[in-house]
């Protein structure tokens, strides 16, 4: 069998998969229905965060989801509609909102996060990947004392079970560490080991290096059929013609459920719509990335810009950029920062995060084809999990010993 592979999806997961397969000598073609790195890999907040171990399925999370349906102004919102797939997803999500399921998922999440941090460091320090990498940590900042103190139980769990402790800082200590904050805050929790980068620069750098090694990228190229015989996929029909290969990878993010007829299996992903605003760095600019959990807003100070992002909206495949959602980002930042934003805005963005109901991705072989693979469903952590995902997928496809246990990411858990 040859080693030609077509990767469907040119986001960070697809490009990371191309990186490891190409370095193993495979002939790689990456296709994307839009632009390479043009979806969630472009406008996300650029956080590489081993601290984000816990899944969304925390105890009590479903109650918050129900409340969100009744509040159109909430940072986390579910738009009520007749959608059987959404209601099935929510039912399965609700079943997992307990401590046991949360901890089980967290171990699978942590394996990819920890591995990816090491891979990123090697990319930047040894392989010359240019992405405005900075290793400055991550602050969780609160305005309310009770909310700040309540996080102590979460920090205890993260410390005892996952060795991911945060340092609690009072208001004075927080402002001393990050002077861009207003002094009226209650305090913060500081994760010293997290990092951040500029996502579009990362994709540009990876693509440049991959093209030098012979990887082909095809944009505005949509998959229309995958066909073969005897459980062996042989060619992909696209809007730009037929591509023959011995292997196929679906790194198709939130679009994966729309491709289930090609995969022959159910991949229950809901598009979780996120937003961001990018602008120049303000005069009083944070040096450390910050999350405001009470407002669900993240702030990333990149070397060449400044980004406000986050928000979560389950609204299907809605393509509109809604001004009131962007306003939530500004309002949230204004509650904490001395200079929360500035002009001119260089881009406003939305993207569909690929949300699975157990917060774990799928990294596995397709049940229909013995030479087609799925790497999708990374929720809000695609950037943070991408290198480990690409490496693990490459190991599985080459039948090598894997550096992390692939069992938590099996597609069979949904069947």
Image (cartoon, rainbow, N blue to C red):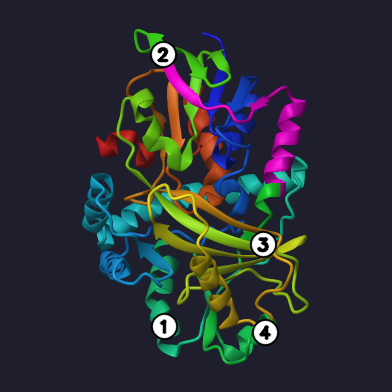
- Check residue 160 in the rendering and tell me which mark sits there, or answer none: none
First in sequence: mark 3 vs mark 2: 2
Disc nearer the start of the sequence (1/4): 1
Q: CA distance from mark 1 to mark 4?
A: 21 Å
Residue 371 visible in image: no
Q: Is residue 307 above or below residue 36?
A: below
Element marked by disc 4: loop
Label 4 belongs to which residue? 338
User: Is residue 258 highlighted in magenta?
Assistant: no
- Label located before the other in sequence (2 or 1): 1
How far apart are the alpha carbons under marks 3 and 1?
Answer: 28 Å
Q: CA distance from mark 3 to mark 2?
A: 42 Å
Find out whether the residues at labels 1 and 4 contact each other: C-beta distance under 8 Å: no
Q: Point out residue 226 in the picture as x, y percentages from the top left corner.
A: 43, 18
Tags 2 and 1 touching, CB below 8 Å: no
Image x and y of residue 321, in percent: 52, 57
- Position of 73 compared to 265: left or right? right
Query: Which of disc 4 and disc 2 is earlier in sequence?
Result: 2
Q: Residues within 10 Å of mark 4 (few under 14, many from 20)?
A: some
SS type, badge 3: strand
140 or 312, nearer to the observer: 312
The quarter in which the C terminus is drawn is: top left
Rendered location of residue 183, percent (x, y)? 62, 91
Query: Label 1, on which residue?
Result: 147
Q: Which disc is residue 278 wearing?
A: 3
Q: Is residue 68 above or below residue 228?
A: below
Q: To which residue does mark 2 refer?
A: 227
Q: Which residues are magenta?
A: 201-227
Q: Residue at x 76, y 62 (%)?
A: 303
**CA neighbours of label 3 inside 10 A, class few (<14), some (14 to 19), many (20+):** many
């Amino acid at each position: 069998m040859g080693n030609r592979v077509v990767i469907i999806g040119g986001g960070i997961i697809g490009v990371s998969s191309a990186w490891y397969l190409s370095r193993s000598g495979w002939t790689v073609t990456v296709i994307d229905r839009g632009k390479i790195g043009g979806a969630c890999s472009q406008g996300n907040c650029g956080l590489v965060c081993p601290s984000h171990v816990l899944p969304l399925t925390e105890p009590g999370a479903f109650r918050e989801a129900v409340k969100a349906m009744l509040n159109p102004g909430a940072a986390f919102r579910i738009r009520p509609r007749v959608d059987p797939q959404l209601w099935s997803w929510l039912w399965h999500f609700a079943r997992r909102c307990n401590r046991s399921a949360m901890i089980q998922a967290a171990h699978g999440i942590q394996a990819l996060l920890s591995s990816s941090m090491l891979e990123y460091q090697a990319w930047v320090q040894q392989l010359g990947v240019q992405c405005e990498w900075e290793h400055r940590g991550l602050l969780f900042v609160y305005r309310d004392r009770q909310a700040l103190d309540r996080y102590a139980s979460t920090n205890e769990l993260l410390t005892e079970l996952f060795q991911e402790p945060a340092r609690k800082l009072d208001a004075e200590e927080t402002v001393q560490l990050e002077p861009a904050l207003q002094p009226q805050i209650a305090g913060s929790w500081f994760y010293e080991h997290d990092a951040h980068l500029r996502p579009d620069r990362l994709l540009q750098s990876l693509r440049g290096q991959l093209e030098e090694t012979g990887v082909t990228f095809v944009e505005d190229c949509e998959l229309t059929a995958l066909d073969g015989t005897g459980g062996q996929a042989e060619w992909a029909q696209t809007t730009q013609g037929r591509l023959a290969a011995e292997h196929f990878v679906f790194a198709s993010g939130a679009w994966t459920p729309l491709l289930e007829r090609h995969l022959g299996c159910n991949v229950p992903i809901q598009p979780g719509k996120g937003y961001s605003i990018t602008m120049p760095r303000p005069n009083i600019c944070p040096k450390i990335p910050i999350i405001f959990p009470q407002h669900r807003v993240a702030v990333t100070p990149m070397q060449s810009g400044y980004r406000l992002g986050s928000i979560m909206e389950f609204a299907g495949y809605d393509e509109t950029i809604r001004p009131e959602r962007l306003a939530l980002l500004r309002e949230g930042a204004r509650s904490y920062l001395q200079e929360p934003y500035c002009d001119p805005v260089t881009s406003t963005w939305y993207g569909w995060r690929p949300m699975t109901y157990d917060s774990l991705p799928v990294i596995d072989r397709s049940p229909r084809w013995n030479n087609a693979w799925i790497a999708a469903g990374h929720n809000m952590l695609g950037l943070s999990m991408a290198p480990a995902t690409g490496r693990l997928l490459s190991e599985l496809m080459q039948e090598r010993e894997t550096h992390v246990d692939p069992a938590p990411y099996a597609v069979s858990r949904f069947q």
